[in-house]
Image: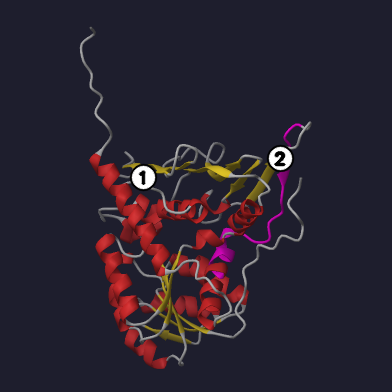
Amino acid sequence: MMIPEEMDYAPKMPLKPCSIAIIGAGGIVRDAHLPAYRKAGWAVAGICDPLLEKAEALALEFDIPRVFTDIGAMIAGMPAGTVYDIAVPASALPGVLRRLPDASVVMMQKPMGENIAEAEEIVRICREKNFTAAVNFQMRFIPAVQLAKKVVESGLIGELHDMEIRMNIYHPWHLWGFLFGIPRMEMLYHSIHYMDMIRYFFGDPAKVYAKTLKHPKMMQLASTRSVILMEYDDIIRAFVNTNHGHEFGLKYQDSFIKLEGTKGAIRTTLGMNLDYPSGVPDTFEYAVLEPGKAPEWKAVTLNGTWFPDAFTGSMANLLCYAEGSAPVLVNSIDSAWRTMQLVEAAYLSSDQGGTTIPYSPML
């Protein structure tokens, strides 16, 4: 059996034009947000960053007409109905949100705060100000992930019971200086994506077991390696295994999601994590069991990649929901709140440690 050619996994695009204002001019804005919006044909009306030269450089590269260093000045200079795309360190989110106009449409870069208290504060602000708000868990909108979701929902690979996410890579953390010295890092800023993705396929787990660890060559970072196991029932196995310190070349690096069902399996490579930020192409392969035939893996040529297409999909869903053409806001603050609760539980599990082995003398 094969994936039907007519299976559509492209994001639904908004019907109405929009004006986007971006707060933050860091690397993720340069590498993903702005290329995504340019590809989609959306107008970016302004960009704001305390460092004028950073904002000016992106404005020049992406033809952004207005540059600001103050959020208040940006808001005053934007047309009514502007969508605010916020890409700042998580701890700065509450302060930025309080300054935005009531009833705004808002996209926040993940995570939703640096801890559960900040996440709760962000939810409260969004509700008090009547925002239509999403958190940019854009990995849900990677074309390979969207196709996998469609395949699972079609029943082609049977009942999904196993999901493995493995990242054995070398990540250039020096590109994000604000990550150094903070008390939580790997699970909060990276594996949060994978925990959220497991929720996307299986829903909320009952429990989580986790351990997050430092790397001897990256001691300035709170952690760079994690193992996270979600507990659902005695059938479903879902876990994340990350190591960001594999500095021994690309040959044995891994960046994949594997899904197994009762009738078939899917394996997709997330190429952006390999040789980041240059990356390699994403891949998608699947196998379906057929009576009397040996399993055969088939490759699918994907329409798009993680950067920038997942960022297009995430923002498109918010825009469609805001205009009323999409019934579900996939990355809603309610969903993000559940993911933040899961991350909090993972840190509690890591801090509390495993079960002590009751060693005793031989009988």
The label shown at residue 208 is 1
Foreground: 300 or 323?
323
Disc sitting over residue 33 in the figure: none
- Residue 180 location, quadrant: bottom left
The quarter of the picture where residue 75 lies is: bottom left
Residue 126: x and y in percent read 34, 76
**Residue for point 64% across, 44% down:** 158
Tell me where the magenta segment starts and ends, as one range.
294-312
Q: Is residue 237 magenta?
A: no
Mark 2 or 1: in front is 1
Residue 342 lies, in percent from the top left, at 35, 53
Give the tally of numbered discs: 2
Residue 4's place in the image compared with 104, above or below, is above
The residues tagged by marks 2 and 1 sit, at their Cα atoms, a distance apart of 32 Å
Percent x, y of residue 330 = 50, 66
Q: Residue at 34% across / 77% down in the picture?
A: 127
Q: Quadrant of the C terminus?
A: top left
Is residue 294 shown above or below 2?
A: above
**Residue 2 shows up from this direction:** yes
Q: Is residue 25 left or right of residue 266?
A: left
Residue 258 spot, x, y in % from top left: 57, 43
- Crowding around mark 1 (Cα neighbors within 10 Å: few <14, some 14 to 19, many 20+) is many
The kind of residue tagged 2 is Trp
Give the crowd class for mark 2: few <14, some 14-19, many >=20 residues within 10 Å.
Answer: some
Is label 2 in a helix, a strand or a loop?
loop
Q: What residue does disc 2 label?
A: 297
Residue type at mark 1: give it. Answer: Val
